[in-house]
Structure formats: structure tokens, C-alpha cells
Amino acid sequence: MSLESKKSLLKNTVALSIPSAVNPFVSLALVYVISRKLGVDGMGQYAILFSYLNIFTTIASLGLGGLIVREVARNPENQGILTTNSVLFGIVSSVIAMFIMDFGVTFLGYDDELRLAFLVGSVSIIPASCARFLESTFRAIEKSEFIAIEQFLENISKVLFCIAVVLTGYGIVAISAVTVLTKFLALGILVYFYIRVIGNFELRFKRSVWTLLVKQSPVFMGIAICSTIHLNIDTIMLSKLADISSVGIYSAAARINQMNVIIPMGFSMAILPIFSRHFGYGLENLQEKTLLSLRLVMIVCLPMVVGVIVLADKIILLIYGPKFYQSILILKLIAPILIPYSMILILAQTLIAANYQQIDFKINLVAALIATASNYILILPFAEYGAVMANMITILIFLGLQLLFIFKKLFPLDLMGIATKPFLAAIGMAFLTYIAREINLFLNVALSAIVYSVLLIVVKGLHPQEIAIIKNVGLNIGQRCINYIRPAR
């Protein structure tokens, strides 16, 4: 990969990963308040509400974000018409999805309070799906720093207002209403940035774009829906096959793991435009980029997994308190899932960039079916532990199918070669993390990160050139964001 491509990839990764790393810690403040003011049942309601909202927002956007990224990256001259028409398309599809959700949840047997929260929260589907399409354009033109700003402002607003309503005695319905308001805020921020950075936002109908979106939507929607199902079905089935307390215990641990997933998620979004634009250079070029991406994901994720396993009890008790003691073992069991899941995110972008989205859809469909069946079978006798086992089974089969197809149709991948050095550095870090586990948690994390970074450089897992690029890119992102936010003179 050229130096310029590495800079572009790392710039957008840093832009998406910095807020992705900060936002979960901000969100922990809300989780902390909910767990203590609303208890295990309140955490369960919170997890169920957002599982449904995630599913129906995905349905509303039809999974077309990846298509917009790919098409804009390949045909930048059509960026304006693709963006505005995708937003118009998203408004129509989100209104339909909202009514489907409102109608469907009335038959699921939840209590009146939770049903009202569903009805209120469903309105957020409209701005959320439109925002996804706008974010896709920013990703395609490699200006992800504006997505970072939007997501951070949305999250901090949501957390502060939700904490305020919970502390004043309100519950899940008020949280749902705040979510709606902050989603509209996020959409407004993106429109503002679009006008400042790209140009006027003209909502003009274009039949050819709608034809493309309608034609491609079955495959991309299938990918998005199946992916959302296999990632959220555990919480939903726990709520129906076990009880609300099991959902609270499980979701407390799962939320910690989701915090770690956000960084590789941001990375995977950053690489799709680069993969798409350079796919025409040949499979060898795509293979190089895929291996580099997998290596960087390993570098980030391996120390996270090790640290969470060693410090699981400290993390759970600090954030949730002693009522969530059962979540400690769940967190230790679920933490290793981060590695295969992060690899899945990267390989999915490889398949889409290579025009194999149909294969990605088929694999996601298999994963959704396996997740549904395994959760049903395992939750009944094992409750939240069954959900952990089902999750691991699904992710490993998913990764295996991806690798099988890529090895057979595209190119081989030296997974052992890219994982060895980060693994050695993570194991070395684990000794310090364990020895220092009785000191302050945040100090332990900071020391462990320093030791891991040093060990990674010693074993030559991160090249000096890449370290310099990361430093320069971070400074450039900050300066560019200040320039765009500053009012024009």
C-alpha cells in the first residue's frame, strides 16, 4: 500500500476511532445512573428498547450505506445526486419501518410502559436513517472527521439529557423521547457540515438513482437485516425465553464488549472507500489492503480482550455495582468474541469492494438462522450463559464461511503471520495488568497501554512510519475540524 493510501486510511480510522473510543466512556455515565436508579429491570428495558430501534433503523436504511460509499468513491462526479436522493429514499423507507415497528410491538406482550417507549422511540428511525446516508457520503469522500464530531455531539447530548430525566424520576419513556430529540440534532449537524464542506443540499428527485437503490436494496437490505438480527437476537430472545433480570445481567456485560467493538467498527467503515476505489488495480492490491487492515485490527483488539478478561470484576463492580456481580463471568466469556467479530467486519468490506455482496448476504443469512436457532436451544436451559454460547457459535461459523470463500475465490490470507506479534505484546501486557489489578483501575489501564505499546514496538508489530503517520494525522484532523467549525468571515 502506498504512503498516501496509508495516510488516508489511518486519517479516517483515527477520525472515527477517537470519538468511538470516547463515546462509550461518556455513555457509561448513563449506564451507571440507570443501573443504580432503575436497577436490573431498568437496564433490561434499556437494552430491549435499543435492540428494537437498531433493528428497525437498519430496516429503514435498507443497508444501502455501503452501496452509497462504494458508488460515490468510484464515481465522485455523481456524489451530489446520489446523496440527496438517498436521503429522500431514506425518508420514505423510514416512515414505513416506523409504522411496522409500532404495529408489531403491540403483539409482543411487553408492559404498557415499554410499549409506550417503543412508540415514542420509533420516531427516531426517520432522522437516524437519513443520517446514515449522509454519513456514507462523508465516508466515501474520506472526511470522516465530521462524522466523528456529529456522533460525539449526539452522544454527549443524549447522555446528559437522559441522566437529567432519570435523576428527576422519569424512566424508559423519557429516555426514548430524549433519543428522538438527539437523533434530529445529529441530522441537523450533518446537514450543516454537508453545506459547509461539500455544497448546497438540494433535494431533487432523480429516477436513475432511485432505480439503482431499489434494484440493489434487496441484497444490501438482506445483509443489514440479517447482520442486525444475529447481533441483537440474543437480547430479544432472552427477554421472551428468560426474564427481564437475565436481560439486565447479560446486557451489562455485552455493553462493555460493545464498547470495544466500536473501534474496529469505525475502522471497517474507514476502509470501504479505499477498498472500493482501488479494487480496479487488481486482487493483489486488495489482498495487501485486507492484510494490513486485519493486522491493525489485531493490534487494537488483542490487548482489549486480555485487559477485559483480567479486569472483568473491577470493571463490572465499578460501573454497575454489586447487584450485577453475575455479569463478571459473562463478561469474561464474551470478551474473546471481539477478535473474530472484528475480522468479520474487515472481510465484509473486502467482499463488498470486490462486488461479492451477494455472498456477504448469504453468509449473513446463515448467521441469522444459526443465531436464532442456537439462542432458542441454549437460552431455555442456560439463560444468559446460553446466549453467550450462541453468540460465540454464530460468530465462529460466520468467520469460517467468509475465510472459506475468500481463500477459494479471491486470495489467501496469512492470519498467523499478522497475529503473532500483537499476541506476544498482549500476553506480555497481561502480566503487568494482573500484577497491578489491585491498584486504581484507570491507572492500571494507562500503565498497561504504555507497556503494550512499548512491547509492540520492540517486537516490531507497529512500524515507525505508521506511528509518525498516526501522530501527524491526529494533528491535521484537529486543525481541519477547527477550521470548518469556526464561523466564516
Image (cartoon, rainbow, N blue to C red):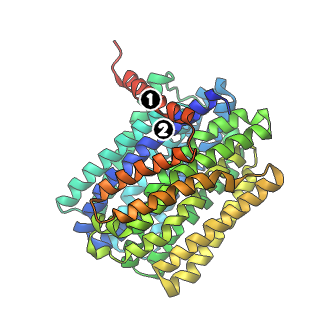
Q: Residue 14 shows which numbered tag?
A: 2
Residues at marks 2 and 1, CA–CA distance in whole angstroms: 9 Å
Would residue 2 appear left or right of 196 to someone viewing this image? right
Would residue 119 appear left or right of 413 to someone viewing this image? left
What amino acid type should be assigned to the residue bearing mark 2?
Answer: Val
Badge 2: how crowded within 10 Å, few (<14), some, or many (20+)?
A: many
Q: Are marks 2 and 1 in contact (CB under 8 Å)?
A: yes
Question: x%, y% of residue 198?
Answer: 51, 23
Q: Nearer the viewer, residue 59 or 301?
A: 301
Q: Which residue is at the far right?
A: 409
- Name the residue rendered at 36%, 15% in the picture: 488
- Name the residue rendered at 58%, 65% in the picture: 230
Question: x%, y% of residue 472?
Answer: 47, 28
**First along the sequence among labels 2 and 1:** 2
Q: Residue 412 shows which numbered tag?
A: none
Q: Which residue is at the far front?
A: 458
- Splitting the image into 4 quarters, where does residue 478 fall? top left
* Residue 110 appearing in the image: no
SS state under label 1: helix
- Name the residue rendered at 46%, 46% in the picture: 454
Q: Which residue is at the far top?
A: 489
- Name the residue rendered at 59%, 43% in the picture: 65
Q: Residue 477 shows which numbered tag?
A: 1
What amino acid type should be assigned to the residue bearing mark 1?
Answer: Ile
- Splitting the image into 4 quarters, where does residue 283 fall? top right
SS state under label 2: helix
Q: Nearer the viewer, residue 131 or 342?
A: 342
Quadrant of the frame with the N terminus: top right
Question: x%, y% of residue 210?
Answer: 66, 38
Q: Nearer the viewer, residue 450 or 264?
A: 450
Q: Is residue 253 above or below residue 131?
A: below
